[in-house]
Amino acid sequence: MIQVQHLSKAFTDPKRGAVRAVDGVSFEVRKGEIFGLLGPNGAGKTTTLRLLATVMTPTAGTAVLNGHDVVRSPGEVRRQIGFLSGDMGLYHRLTPREILAFFGQLNGLDGAALKSRIAEMVALLDMRSFADTKVDQLSTGMRQRVAIARTLIHDPPILILDEPAAGLDVPTARVIEEFILEARRAGKCILLSTHVMEEAEFLCDRIAVIHQGRIRITGTMEELRAATGKQRLRGIFLALLGIDVDTAGRS
């Protein structure tokens, strides 16, 4: 459902000159799959996700989401995706229920269908206790649940999630993880960026490690172990970045 071929994005930095934030990235994500994109800060993860979500335009290469090209048909691509970005995209003076109604209407829902979908999202992400409280009074974890519900309100076939559990406590992160697993069971195509190795190892069917704008490896955990000789994802990740932790006995 996601096909990325030789995708690149270059910027001009006043100090560094031309910078390739994404450099010839290629991968695919299937229906009913959670695909993890891992990398250190500045590796190109968020830029890649923004290119796929049509927030940015690629310098070169192609990306097709559910049959629609990100350059030729950006409007159609947006109808196919739910994009969770780092800034959440919430209006603090509104309640979660009002936010879901607003974004649902933007995506063509109304009347009984919209009301039913809002109720479904409130139940799915356990938001009953704060669904009618203004966002500026909610905790970070509560806001993240609202942001995810906003992402899913129009029931898109593709989810692009940038650090969905960042900064959350363990119980709240678990709610988010359960939501992601349920989305996979429902046949969604899920592209997930995360810094949390345990989260990626637990959730992802396949993982790509990106570093300096390029994909270093793509595969299942078994394939990554075979390629690197490491067992834990942390050790695999560090080995691909050229950092050897064997002497510490933790890889």
Image (cartoon, helix red, strand yellow):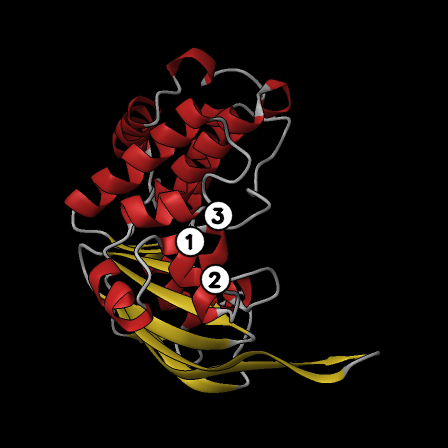
Mark 3 or mark 1: which is in front? 1
What amino acid is found at the position of numbered circle 1 in the picture? Answer: Arg
Do the residues under discs 3 and 2 have CB atoms within 8 angstroms?
no
Q: How far apart are marks 3 and 2 (CA)?
A: 19 Å
Considering every residue shown, the one lying at the far top of the view is: 129
**Residue at the spot of label 2:** 238
Residue shown at 51%/31% (left/top)? 168
Do the residues under discs 3 and 1 have CB atoms within 8 angstroms?
no
Q: Residue 115 appears at what percent x and percent y?
A: 31, 27
Quarter of the figure with the N terminus: bottom left
Q: Residue 148 appears at what percent x and percent y?
A: 42, 38
Lower position in the chain sequence, tag 3 or tag 2 = 3
Residue 161 against residue 118 in the figure, above or below: below
Q: Quadrant of residue 216?
A: bottom left
Q: Report crowding for label 3: few under 14, some 14 to 19, many 20 or more residues within 10 A (C-alpha).
A: some
Quarter of the figure with the C terminus: bottom left
Q: Residue 76 appears at what percent x and percent y?
A: 35, 67
Do the residues under discs 2 and 1 have CB atoms within 8 angstroms?
yes
Residue 136 against residue 104 in the figure, above or below: above
Q: Nearer the viewer, residue 4 or 109?
A: 4
What amino acid is found at the position of numbered circle 3 in the picture? Answer: Glu
- Residue 192 can be seen in this image: no
**Residue at the spot of label 1:** 234
Q: Residue 46 appears at what percent x and percent y?
A: 53, 61
Lower position in the chain sequence, tag 3 or tag 1 = 3
Q: Report crowding for label 1: few under 14, some 14 to 19, many 20 or more residues within 10 A (C-alpha).
A: some
